[in-house]
C-alpha cells in the first residue's frame, strides 16, 4: 500500500507542530496502516474509516506533545493498493 496525505489546519502553528513531530506521526501511521485489513480498504467506507483513524492518530500525537491546536481534516492525495 502506498498512501500520501495532506492535512488541513486553520493556523500555521498547527502545521509547524505536525512538521516538528513528523517522525512520531509517521511511525504511528505506519503501525496503523500495517494493521488495516486490505479487503476493508477496497470499500469507500473502509477508506473513510482509515481517514478518520489517521486524523485521530495525528491529533493524539499533537495532544500528547501539548500542541495548542489540532488538525481539522486529512485528505488522501495518493492511495495505491496492490
Image (spheres, rainbow, N blue to C red):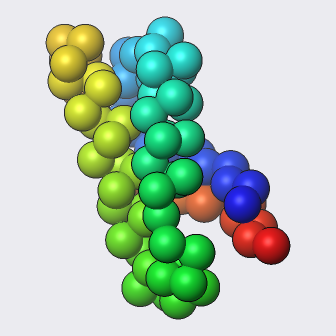
Indicate left or right for 47 with 64 as reference: right
What residue is at 28 percent from the left and 47 percent from the top?
56
Could you tell me residue 35's position as x and y percent? 46, 56
Could you tell me residue 13's position as x and y percent? 38, 16
What residue is at 52 percent from the left and 53 percent from the top?
33
Q: Please indicate, yes or no, whether residue 12 appears anywhere in the rendered image.
A: no
Could you tell me residue 74's position as x and y percent? 46, 53
Front-most of 73 and 59? 59
Front-most of 32 and 67? 32
Indicate left or right for 31 with 1 as reference: left
9 w.r.t. 66: above or below:
below
What residue is at 61 percent from the left and 49 percent from the top?
5
What residue is at 80 percent from the left and 73 percent from the top?
82
Find residue 8 and report its image quarter: top left
Q: Please indicate, yes or no, whether residue 3 appears anywhere in the rendered image.
A: yes
Could you tell me residue 80's position as x and y percent? 77, 67
52 w.r.t. 73: above or below:
below
Indicate left or right for 76 with 49 as reference: right
- Tally the numbered discs: 0
> Among all residues in the image, which is located at the extreme bottom?
43
Q: Which quadrant of the figure contains the N terminus?
A: bottom right
Find residue 42 and report its image quarter: bottom right
Front-most of 70 and 11? 70
11 w.r.t. 30: above or below:
above
Amino acid at each position: 500500500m502506498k498512501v500520501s496525505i495532506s492535512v488541513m489546519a486553520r493556523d500555521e502553528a498547527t502545521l509547524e507542530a505536525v512538521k516538528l513531530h513528523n517522525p512520531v506521526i509517521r511511525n504511528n501511521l505506519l503501525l496503523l496502516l500495517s494493521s488495516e485489513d486490505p479487503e476493508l480498504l477496497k470499500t469507500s467506507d473502509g477508506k473513510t474509516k482509515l481517514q478518520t483513524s489517521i486524523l485521530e492518530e495525528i491529533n493524539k500525537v499533537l495532544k500528547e506533545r501539548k500542541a495548542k491546536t489540532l488538525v481539522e481534516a486529512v485528505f488522501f492525495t495518493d492511495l495505491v493498493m496492490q
